[in-house]
Image (spheres, rainbow, N blue to C red):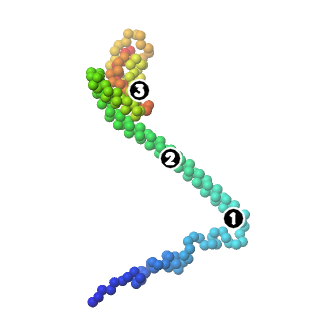
Amino acid sequence: MTDHVTTTSERQPEAGHPPESQPPDAAAGGPAAVGPPVSECGEDGGGDTSQGAAELEAEQDHYLRLLRRVQAEFEKYRKRIQRDHGEEAVRAAAEALGRLLPVLDAVDTAAEHHRDVVGPLQTALHSATEQLGLERFDPAGEAFDPDVHEAVEREPGDGSEPDGLLVTRVLRPGYRLKGRLLRPAMVAVTG
């Protein structure tokens, strides 16, 4: 008893499938060419060429308007993505720098007591964070603004203050990142 091995050339096509050596349309009995029949392409031999040209021009105008609209939509999309990317970068930087604020406060406090040892580190940290867009603000002597100041102490005034409250001491500096408030300044006010 010998086993018979069938080679590719001996295989018969399965029912409903064209042989592999012929194009699918030719195996199905259809034309092998791709595309619409010649009669559908506008070459019927006796048609009005000016009407055909007008139809082609109208179709061309339609696709040109469509192309311009798609280009405008894509340009809007591209600008929105750039804007969103920029906002996301600022948000990420704000989160990272916000976590560093207690470290900056600790370095500032240490520098008050050991300027000769901690001073260079303080300068380097503040310089690096400023390059990233972090802005420290110390509002001593300014009018109190509840949007950027957090008052934790209030002292009675002597009557020489302008209308409202005046920041007399800064207990903890405030920080902004590219114009956005990261942390309000903790202050004492008089008035």
Q: Position of residue 76 (x, y in %)?
A: 52, 46
Identity of the amino acid at label 2? Answer: Arg
Residues at marks 1 and 3 touching, judged by CB atoms closer than 8 Å: no
Q: Nearer the viewer, residue 107 or 91?
A: 107
What secondary structure is marked by label 3? loop
x 39%, y 31%: residue: 130
- Can see residue 37? yes
Q: Is residue 65 above or below residue 24?
A: above
What secondary structure is marked by label 2? helix
Q: Is residue 183 left or right of residue 55?
A: left
Which mark, by number, is residue 140?
Answer: none
Which mark, by number, is residue 147?
Answer: 3
Tell me how far mark 3 sits from mark 2, CA to CA.
34 Å
Q: Position of residue 24 (x, y in %)?
A: 49, 76
Question: Where is mark 1, residue-wise?
Answer: 52
Q: Position of residue 67 (x, y in %)?
A: 58, 54
- Can see residue 152? no
What secondary structure is marked by label 1? helix
Question: Where is mark 2, residue-wise?
Answer: 78
